[in-house]
Image: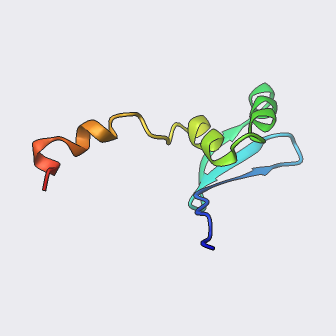
Amino acid sequence: MGRVARSFDYVERADGSVVISHHGRPAGTLRGDRAAQFLAEVREDPQLVMARWTGNYRRGNERAARQHPRNRG
């Protein structure tokens, strides 16, 4: 089968902080309680959770943009 595209990745550092990267570039660093909360939540659906924590996720306006006269084709 095909390979699953993974645009987000994270690294847990020894000091307890978490660095989230998007396409190999740092997208955010979490420390303290936020890092612990992220690590507890990331086990569910890692790509979606990392997208949500970095703010890089779909905002729900894709359908409206597709129907705009400029984008109809």
For residue 2, side relative to residue 18 (left or right)? left
Q: Is 69 in front, or is 55? A: 69
Residue at horizontal 41 percent and vertical 34 percent from the top: 59
Residue at the extreme bottom: 1
Residue at the extreme left: 69
Where residue 17 appears, x then y in whole percent? 79, 40
Q: Quadrant of the N terminus?
A: bottom right
Q: Is 40 in front, or is 15? A: 40
For residue 17, side relative to residue 26 (left or right)? right
For residue 14, side relative to residue 45 (left or right)? right
Q: Quadrant of the C terminus?
A: bottom left
Residue at horizontal 57 percent and vertical 42 percent from the top: 51
Give residue 34's quadrant in the image.
top right
For residue 32, side relative to residue 68 (left or right)? right
Where residue 21 appears, x then y in whole percent? 63, 53
Q: How is the image coloured?
A: rainbow
Looking at the rendered structure, the number of numbered marks drawn on it comes to 0
Residue at horizontal 89 percent and vertical 47 percent from the top: 14
Q: Is 15 in front, or is 20? A: 20
Examine the rendered structure and indicate whether residue 35 appears above or below residue 48.
above
Where residue 46 appears, x then y in whole percent? 69, 46
Residue at the extreme front: 1
Residue at the extreme right: 14
Give residue 62's quadrant in the image.
top left
